[in-house]
């Protein structure tokens, strides 16, 4: 603080780099020191609030409150707080009228939360309760199915992603199907039906040779696993089996009339494995 007092220009908001207040918050300055710097004339900016939301020093909520009390825009840090999985900071920002869909560098908080690898169920629920949504993307949907632990929360999250416009479906490529094929084996037990519905069918992914090889491998591996038998059945009833039968024929063999009815209801083609 003595140096800042002797160099008052360091308090000014700069376009070419962080100001003194933002630097103080980044290096872990306590709330009391932040308060003193604000009293000297520093401006509480969105950048300083972002820096506070990213802290893991244990006093980040106090620093956030101090900055908000001095005019920092609450929406500026929602996405960053969601990315690091700090549900307390996210909740405080929302209480202070932050927009739950405020983008940060073009990405909404819900998307940042899901794809960060650090988000927890509490942060997801906080965002969803506030009305957060996320643009539907193949990557975000796949990661959500892989990583969100709670099935009820996952269901809410998938509902918060609107259906994909037809024009966007056409941009899905064989490369997307190749990536999904590689990731398919990492999907938690019991969730393959979600991948089929919300990823493969929703994006109308083109089936590649790798896809069919992956399908056969997983069906053979999972059929004898009591925890994954339902996943093997879901694959067979949607895409046919390893014996060349169509999906409808597989549903009949497996005595799954409801799955066959869903194929008819959703007007899905009777796929036959090559």
Image: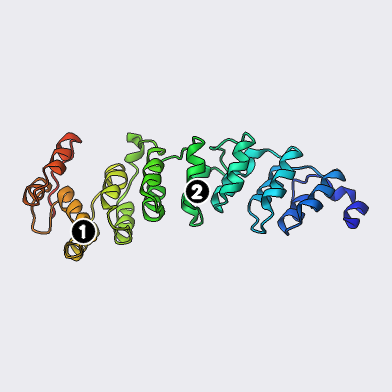
Residue 132 visible in this rendered orientation of the protein: no
Residue drawn at point x = 57 percent, y = 38 percent: 102
Mark 1 residue crowding within 10 angstroms, few (<14) / some (14–19) / many (20+): many
Q: Quadrant of the C terminus?
A: bottom left
| Mark earlier in primary sequence (1, 2) | 2
Task: Quote the CA–CA distance across marks 1 and 2.
Answer: 34 Å
In the rendered image, residue 260, in percent from the top left (x then y), is placed at 13, 42
- Give the label on residue 215, or none: 1
Mark nearest the camera among 1 and 2 is 2
Q: Which residue is denoted by mark 2 in the rendering?
A: 122
Residue drawn at point x = 84 percent, y = 50 percent: 10
In the rendered image, residue 154, in percent from the top left (x then y), is placed at 38, 46
Give the colour scheme of this rendering.
rainbow
In the rendered image, residue 177, in percent from the top left (x then y), is placed at 30, 53
**Mark 1: secondary structure:** helix
Residue 268 visible in this rendered orientation of the protein: yes
Decide if residue 96 is on the left or right side of residue 209. right
97 w.r.t. 206: above or below: above
């Amino acid at each position: 603080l003595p140096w800042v007092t002797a160099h008052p220009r360091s308090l000014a908001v700069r376009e070419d780099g962080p100001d003194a207040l933002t630097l103080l918050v980044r290096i872990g300055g306590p709330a009391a020191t932040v308060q003193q710097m604000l009293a000297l004339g520093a401006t509480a900016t969105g950048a300083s609030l972002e820096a506070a939301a990213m802290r893991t020093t244990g006093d980040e909520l106090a620093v956030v409150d101090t900055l908000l009390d001095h005019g920092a825009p609450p929406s500026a840090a929602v996405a960053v707080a969601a990315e690091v999985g700090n549900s307390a900071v996210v909740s405080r920002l929302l209480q202070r009228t932050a927009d739950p869909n405020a983008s940060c560098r073009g990405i909404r908080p819900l998307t940042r939360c899901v794809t960060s690898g650090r988000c927890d169920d509490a942060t997801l629920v906080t965002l969803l309760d506030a009305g957060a949504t996320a643009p539907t993307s193949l990557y975000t949907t796949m990661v959500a199915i892989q990583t969100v632990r709670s099935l009820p929360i996952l269901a809410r999250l998938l509902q918060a992603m609107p259906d994909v416009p037809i024009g966007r479906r056409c941009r899905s490529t064989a490369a997307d199907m190749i990536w999904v094929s590689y990731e398919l084996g990492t999907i938690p037990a019991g969730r393959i039906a979600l991948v089929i519905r919300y990823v493969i069918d929703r994006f109308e992914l083109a089936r590649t040779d790798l896809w069919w090889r992956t399908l056969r491998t997983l069906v053979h591996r999972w059929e004898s696993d009591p925890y994954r038998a339902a996943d093997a059945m879901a694959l067979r009833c949607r895409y046919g089996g390893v014996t060349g039968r169509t999906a409808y024929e597989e549903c009949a063999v497996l005595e799954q009339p409801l799955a066959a009815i869903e194929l008819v209801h959703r007007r899905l083609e009777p796929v036959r494995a090559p």
